C-alpha cells in the first residue's frame, strides 16, 4: 500500500463532517471516534478494537460532547460507518450497523496500518491530528476538554498548520474587530469590558453557529463574550432563547459564590443590546445553537 501523506489524511478527516450535513445538524460521532482512537494509539499503541470492549467508553465520549439523544449505545453508528479508507472491519459473519450484530459477531475494527505508520512517523503528529479534528468539527473551546477526555496532552501542539490549507473556507480577519465594536467591547452576557493599555483584554468574538459548521463571519452570527462566557456558550452550558434571554443548562454544577454570580444568576436574564443599528444574533443561528450545542441535560 502506498504511503499516505499528512495532507491526504487531513483531507479525509476534514470530510467526515459531510455526513448528515444536509440537514444542517452537526455530526460529531465520527470525529469523536477518531479522537478516541488517537488517544488509544498514543497511550497504548493499540490500533485494533473489539466492539464489545470499547462500546461503553466511546459511547460515553459521544454523550459528553454531542447534543443529547436517547440512544445509550451511540458507539455503534461511527464504529460501523467510519470510512473504510481509515478503518477496516472484520468479524464472524456479516457485520451491520446494529449493536446486537456488532456484539454477536465479535466485530473488530483496525485503524489502517498506513495511517498508523504515518501518525507515529513524527513526534507530535498524533496531537496535531487531534487538534485538527477538533478545529474542523468543533471550536477551540473543545481542545482542552476533549484532549483530556481521550488522554492526550493539548500542550504538545498549539495549532494545526494544516487547518487553513485543507479548509476551503477562509476566515474573515475583520470579524473580530467588527463584532467587538458592534457590542461596545463588552461581554453580551455579563457586561465585562476590561482594557489594558487601550486594548480590549479578555473579550472575544464568538460565533453563534460555529464556523466549523458553516456559520458565517457576519454580525448576525456574532457576539462579544468574555473568555468564560465564550467557553461556556461553546460548550453548551449557556444558550439563548428565541426572545434573546440567557439559558443555563440544568446539568451545570458550580458550588461557589462565584459560580452563582457568573453563571446561575444569568439564567433568564436578557442578553445585553449591541450598539444602535447593530443586529442582535439572528434567530436562525440562535436556534441552531440551541438544538446542536446547548445541553438539555436534566439535573441528576
Ligand atoms: Zn461575560
Image (cartoon, rainbow, N blue to C red):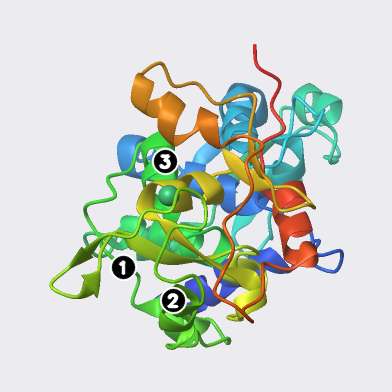
Residue 75 image label: none
> Residue drawn at (72%, 58%), measured in percent from left and top?
286
**Element on which disc 3 rests:** helix
Residue 163 image label: 2
State yes or no: discs 3 and 2 in contact (Cβ < 8 Å).
no
Residue 203 image-quadrant placement: bottom left
* Residue beneath disc 1: 159
Q: How many labels does the image show?
A: 3
- Left or right? Give the position of 23 relative to 287: right
Q: Position of residue 53 (x, y in %)?
A: 59, 23
Residue 49 image-quadrant placement: top right
Q: How far apart are marks 2 and 1 (CA)?
A: 8 Å
* Residue beneath disc 3: 145
Going from N to C along the chain, the mark reached first, 1 or 3, is 3
Q: How far apart are marks 3 and 2 (CA)?
A: 20 Å
- Crowd tier of the residue under label 3, counting other residues whose Cα lies within 10 Å: few below 14, some 14–19, many 20 or above: some
Res 5 seen here: no
Amino acid at each position: 500500500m502506498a504511503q499516505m501523506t499528512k495532507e491526504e489524511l487531513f483531507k479525509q478527516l476534514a470530510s467526515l463532517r459531510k455526513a448528515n450535513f444536509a440537514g444542517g445538524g452537526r455530526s460529531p460521532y465520527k470525529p469523536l471516534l477518531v479522537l478516541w482512537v488517537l488517544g488509544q494509539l498514543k497511550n497504548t499503541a493499540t490500533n485494533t478494537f473489539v466492539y464489545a470492549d470499547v462500546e461503553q467508553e466511546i459511547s460515553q465520549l459521544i454523550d459528553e460532547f454531542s447534543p443529547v439523544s436517547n440512544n445509550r449505545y451511540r458507539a455503534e453508528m461511527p464504529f460501523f460507518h467510519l470510512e473504510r479508507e481509515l478503518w477496516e472491519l472484520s468479524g464472524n459473519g456479516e457485520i451491520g450497523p446494529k449493536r446486537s450484530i456488532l456484539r454477536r459477531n465479535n466485530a473488530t475494527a483496525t485503524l489502517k496500518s498506513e495511517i498508523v505508520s504515518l501518525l507515529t512517523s513524527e513526534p507530535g503528529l498524533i496531537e496535531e491530528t487531534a487538534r485538527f479534528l477538533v478545529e474542523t468539527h468543533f471550536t477551540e473551546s473543545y481542545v482542552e476538554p476533549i484532549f483530556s477526555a481521550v488522554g492526550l496532552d493539548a500542550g504538545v501542539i498549539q495549532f494545526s498548520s494544516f487547518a487553513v490549507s485543507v479548509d476551503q473556507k477562509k476566515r474573515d480577519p475583520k470579524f473580530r474587530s467588527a463584532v467587538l465594536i458592534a457590542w461596545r467591547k463588552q461581554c453580551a452576557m455579563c457586561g465585562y469590558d476590561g482594557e489594558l493599555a487601550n486594548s480590549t483584554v479578555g473579550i472575544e468574538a464568538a460565533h453563534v453557529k460555529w464556523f466549523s459548521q458553516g456559520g458565517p463571519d457576519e454580525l448576525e452570527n456574532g457576539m462579544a463574550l468574555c473568555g468564560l462566557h465564550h467557553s461556556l456558550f461553546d460548550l453548551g452550558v449557556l444558550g439563548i432563547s428565541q426572545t434573546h434571554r440567557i439559558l443555563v443548562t440544568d446539568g451545570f454544577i458550580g458550588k461557589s459564590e462565584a459560580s452563582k454570580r457568573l453563571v446561575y444568576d444569568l439564567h433568564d436574564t436578557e442578553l445585553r443590546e449591541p450598539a444602535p443599528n447593530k443586529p442582535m444574533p439572528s434567530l436562525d443561528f440562535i436556534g441552531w445553537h440551541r438544538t446542536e450545542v446547548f445541553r438539555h441535560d436534566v439535573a441528576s
